[in-house]
């Protein structure tokens, strides 16, 4: 055994599992948006694979609003030792999309067409758990708009986003 091998840290790993995303997506045309998002909260609708991969979860939903929680860890770090901005952006985008989804009737979907993110403070593993809250500022039949905030465990604002989402029949 070399000195490097004997002093090496244990391997860091994480196992990720998820359910068939197409089977879950097939539920969307059969449910209103609010029922679909609330189903992710109560477990009757499996979360999308990205939620398992990122370790984020929707914990509250009302018409035009959602709240996500996220536990950052070092697997989310960028080369300079902070949570990668893309991770925060994905969380903000997911919360905005689900907030818009809560306003949609059965048979409608959405997709992001623009997101503007402002990173206000660095995010570290010790920042969590994080809370991401999205509010629809203008629902729409073709385009909807949402604002999102991301706060740390102490309530300090870490990032904000404004999002535009295309609404369409499935």
Image (cartoon, helix red, strand yellow):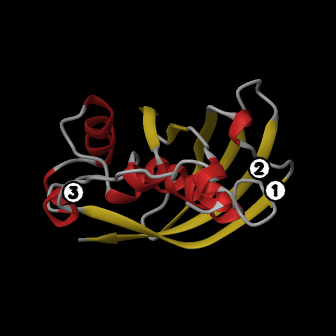
> Which of the two labelled residues, at mark 3 and mark 2, occupies the earlier sequence position?
3
* Foreground: disc 3 or disc 1: 1
Residue 93 position in % (x across, y down)? 56, 59
Q: Hey, which residue is sitting farthest top in the picture?
A: 154
Determine the residue positioned at 51% across, 53% down: 11
Residue 138 position in % (x across, y down)? 58, 54
Label 2: state its secondary structure. strand
Does residue 146 show up?
no
The residue that mark 1 highlights is 119
Mark number for residue 159?
2
* Foreground: disc 3 or disc 2: 2
Q: Relative to residue 165, is residue 103 drawn left or right?
A: left
Is residue 155 or residue 107 the one in the foreground?
155
> Which of the two labelled residues, at mark 3 and mark 1, occupies the earlier sequence position?
3
Q: Relative to residue 84, is residue 166 drawn left or right?
A: left
The residue that mark 3 highlights is 28
Label 3: state its secondary structure. helix
């Amino acid at each position: 055994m070399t000195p490097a091998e004997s002093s090496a840290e244990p391997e860091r790993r994480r196992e990720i599992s998820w359910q068939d995303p197409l089977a879950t997506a097939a539920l969307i045309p059969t449910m209103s948006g609010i029922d679909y998002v609330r189903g992710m909260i109560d477990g009757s609708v499996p979360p999308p694979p990205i939620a398992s991969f990122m370790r984020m979860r929707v914990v509250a939903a009302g018409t035009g609003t959602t709240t996500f929680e996220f536990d950052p860890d070092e697997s989310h770090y960028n080369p300079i030792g902070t949570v990668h901005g893309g991770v925060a952006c994905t969380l903000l985008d997911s919360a905005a999309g689900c907030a818009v989804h809560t306003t949609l009737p059965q048979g409608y979907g959405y997709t992001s067409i623009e997101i503007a993110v402002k990173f206000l403070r660095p995010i570290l593993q010790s920042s969590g758990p994080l809370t991401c809250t999205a509010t629809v500022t203008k629902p729409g039949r073709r385009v909807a708009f949402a604002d999102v905030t991301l706060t740390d465990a102490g309530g300090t604002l870490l990032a904000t986003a404004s999002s535009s989402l295309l609404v369409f029949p499935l």
